[in-house]
Image: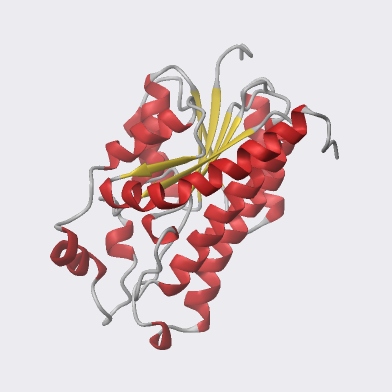
Amino acid sequence: MPTDRKAIFITGAASGIGLAAAKRFAAEGWLVGLSDIDGPGLKTALAAIGGDNAGFTVLHDVRKEDEWERALDAFMEASGGRLDVLLNNAGIARYGWFTEQGRADFDDQIDINLRGVILGAYLGHERLKHTPGSRLINIASLASLSGSPRLAVYSATKFAVRGLSEALDIEFMRSGVRVSCVEPTVIETPLLDKASAPGGPNFREAITQGMGGGLPVEQAAEVIWRAAHDDALHYPVGEAPEAMLQEILPRIEETRTRWAEMFKAGLVTN
């Protein structure tokens, strides 16, 4: 495998935003690694992408460190040692009143949406730093900008992903790895159906009534493509997150600029 071919590793790639992003990058000639816990879904995704650019799939539970190691090592071997982008996309939601959800609902969201992202950032950085110009992209949410009722724990995990991204964007300056955080509004993906518990409030119906439905998944994929190439930290998808981010971006950019100047001046070295 020639090492001049750019490579991206995507979690949660069997459907939704992950699959749409995989199609977008594969169309540009990138080698795309598809990671998911859904084996049959991976096979379907691979067929949907087609061609040689999506020739790598791996069953991968993002909650488990050993599976991260195994998946990344296998992909690095397939890519000739190159990792330009790691897209931390895998995530779940449980829609319903906080007091009516159970421990398993909390644990699943925290373990997949946050622990999985932290493991990806930690273990991915060790591989990303060896590819010049590499990027870690974390998928947050509109719910990372404003707490969402009936999505309380989901919102908490996505707030954490946004905070992690902002901190790591500064920390990873030392190794030359950039960090991007994508904040989609509601996107038309299987998550709209899977988020609802049997017999509980229907997430898709609530979204349709409140927002008229989700945006096309290709719109999120296009923003992810920009996040892999542009210099910003935050990338909203949709009007609502874009408006909310405008209120906090000046503070974030001021902090990033101050730290960047300290690194350049040699005031912070380790």
Left or right placement of residue 228 versus residue 78 in this view = left
Tally of marks: 0
For the point 27% across and 63% down, the residue is 193
Q: Whole-percent x and y of residue 149?
A: 34, 75
Rendering quarter of residue 47: top left
Can residue 119 be seen here? The reply is yes
Q: How is the image coloured?
A: secondary structure
Left or right placement of residue 32 versus residue 179 in this view = left
Seen in the picture, residue 229 relative to 22 is either above or below; the reply is above
Which of 60/86 is in front? 86
Which of 102/140 is in front? 140
Which of 134/197 is in front? 134
Left or right placement of residue 48 versus residue 212 in this view = right
Q: Whole-percent x and y of residue 93?
A: 40, 65
| Residue found farthest to the right | 270
Q: Whole-percent x and y of residue 34?
A: 49, 38
| Residue found farthest to the bottom | 99
Seen in the picture, residue 87 relative to 90 is either above or below; the reply is above
Seen in the picture, residue 30 relative to 120 is either above or below; the reply is above
For the point 55% across and 25% down, the residue is 7
Q: Whole-percent x and y of residue 94?
A: 39, 71
Tell me the quadrant of the picture where the C terminus can be found: top right
Tell me the quadrant of the picture where the N terminus can be found: top right
For the point 33% across and 43% down, the residue is 237
Can residue 62 be seen here? The reply is no
For the point 36% across and 53% down, the residue is 244
Rendering quarter of residue 44: top left
